[in-house]
Image: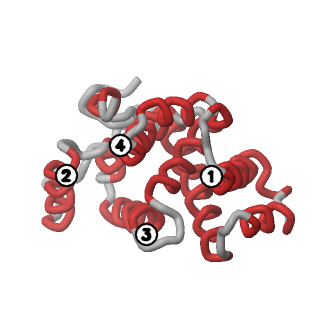
Amino acid sequence: MPDKDQPTALDLPMIDPLPEETAKYFAICEDKLGMVPNVLRAYAFDTTKLNAFTAMYNDLMLSDSGLSKLEREMIAVVVSSINKCFYCLTAHGAAVRELSGDPELGEMLVMNWRVAALDARQTAMLTFAEKITKASAEITEADRQALRDVGFSDRDIWDIANVAGFFNMTNRVASATDMRPNAAYHGQFR
């Protein structure tokens, strides 16, 4: 288990002092979230890696998409549940609770997304995300067509695949380094 001052079990302290641009970004996090997420602190030993991570995250999770922010967070939680990623389940479970206004939905997605009262679109999306996580090489045109059949465009399918792929990568990094979520996430939006 990492030291309370370190976001992971690795001895990779943040650059000190932080570059001005990074310090500004962390101040925005503090203002908006009341904390700097530990995943950002973990990457802050190397600003090139931090910037690459945040650019990809912000593009996938916050930019314009046919997927809502809630849908993207739902994918993050389902992928993280399959991968048993403590960090992402905690952080993105809080985001699902916030965006949906439904604490129960967040818990259902963490434990077993199939018990949640989801519509056909959400069910197809999460089925696809699950298959990407468990057996991406087995995806066929029928899997993509199932998404089209419930209204997803090919661009949406691209976004689903990329969000699921991103969280499969980050889950593995977080688990391998024993990355711990900020304590504040545990009680948020319940």
Q: Are marks 1 and 3 in contact (CB under 8 Å)?
A: no
Distance from disc 4 to disc 1, alpha carbons, whole Å, reads: 18 Å
- Element on which disc 3 rests: helix
Nearest to N terminus: mark 1 or mark 3: 3
- At 48% from the left and 41% from the top, the residue drawn is 174
Instruction: Determine which of the numbered discs, if any, sits on residue 59 in the image.
Output: 3
* Picture quadrant where residue 78 is located: top right
Residue 131 in the image: above or below residue 63: above
Marker disc for residue 98:
4
**Mark 3 vs mark 4: which is more N-terminal?**
3
Is label 4 in contact with label 1 (beta carbons under 8 Å)? no
Question: Hey, what amino acid is under mark 2?
Answer: Lys
Q: Is the C-beta separation of discs 4 and 2 under 8 Å? A: no
Q: For mark 4, does the 10 Å Cα neighbourhood hold few (<14), some (14 to 19), or many (20 or more) residues? A: some
Q: Position of residue 151 (x, y in %)?
A: 67, 68
Q: Position of residue 12 (x, y in %)?
A: 33, 43
Residue at 36% across / 27% down in the picture? 2
Of the pair 119 and 181, the residue shown nearer to us:
119
When the figure is inspected, residue 34 is found, relative to residue 3, above or below; the finding is: below
- Mark 2 and mark 1 lie on one chain; the one further toward the N terminus is 2
Q: Point out the frontmost of discs 2 and 1.
A: 1
- Cα–Cα gap, marks 3 and 2: 18 Å
User: What residue did someone put label 2 on?
Assistant: 32
x then y, percent, for residue 75:
57, 50
